Amino acid sequence: MPKVSRKDDKVPLQEVPMAMDTEAGFEGAESLPAKPAFAPVSAQEGGQKVEFRRVPVPQHRMTPLKTHWMELYSPITDNLKLDMRMNLKTKKVEIKTTPQTPNSDVLQKAADFVHAFLLGFEVRDAIALLRLDDLYVECFEVKDVKTLRGEHMARCIGRLAGKSGKTKFTIENATRTRLVIADQRIHILGSFQNIRVARDALCALIMGSPPGKVYSRLRNVCARLNDS
């Protein structure tokens, strides 16, 4: 750094001239134009390109997709104003925007709706993804929580489902979520907070906790959530 002499140190600071305020505010405030107000435009009017979403279809979900095709097709084309088709060559469901699409955000909602159905959720449960904004699907595997093999894995899956699905239904009703147990994969549909409560209950069952202890913990957590 350059050295500062004592003479320079004694020189008083000079004031920098600032723009003077006027009675009406800052200078030139009266000459500013009014703020423009534009009406919202659709995705096509805004000059955006046609957007696509392609959802791959697993082989074991082809038959349910054919059976419930119209239940998936109607809300996407009638309510969201999107185009949807099944590409049999690539085995993917293709969704794209149209000139009537209100905005491009609904395209991702439609893709999530179809993806949730292909994971194993029922149409009446998956369609909530189109109506509500704070719903998500979380997926994890049993081995992510604990490494199990052979009969230990089979007993763990049996603990998660319960006799005639009793444990699964209890967790669903208590946490207001929907569960799909597909072999070692578990899918949870619900809001962020409810997914966390359901995941904690499932992880406790995987680690070996008895269902009665998990039920009592669920009861306390859900009562605390309802009070808040």
Image: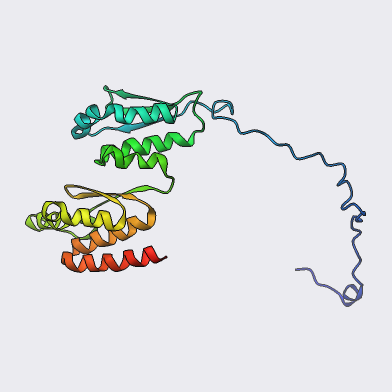
> Is any atom of residue 153 visible in this view?
yes
Nearer to me, 31 or 178 = 178
In the drawing, does residue 146 fall left or right of residue 138?
A: left
Residue 217 location, x and y as percent?
26, 68
Q: Residue at x 87, y 53 (%)?
A: 25
Q: Quadrant of residue 157?
A: bottom left
Nearer to me, 179 or 88 = 179
Nearer to me, 48 or 124 = 124
Q: Residue at x 33, y 55 (%)?
A: 195
Residue 130 location, x and y as percent?
40, 39
| Quadrant (top left/top right/bottom left/bottom right) for the N terminus | bottom right
Q: Quadrant of residue 93?
A: top left
Residue 180 location, x and y as percent?
23, 47
Q: Is residue 58 above or below residue 16?
A: above
> Is any atom of residue 209 visible in this view?
no
| Quadrant (top left/top right/bottom left/bottom right) for the C terminus | bottom left
Q: Residue at x 32, y 63 (%)?
A: 222
In the drawing, does residue 228 fall left or right of residue 63?
A: right
In the drawing, does residue 205 fall left or right of residue 32?
A: left
Q: Is residue 72 above or below residue 156?
A: above
Nearer to me, 177 or 155 = 177
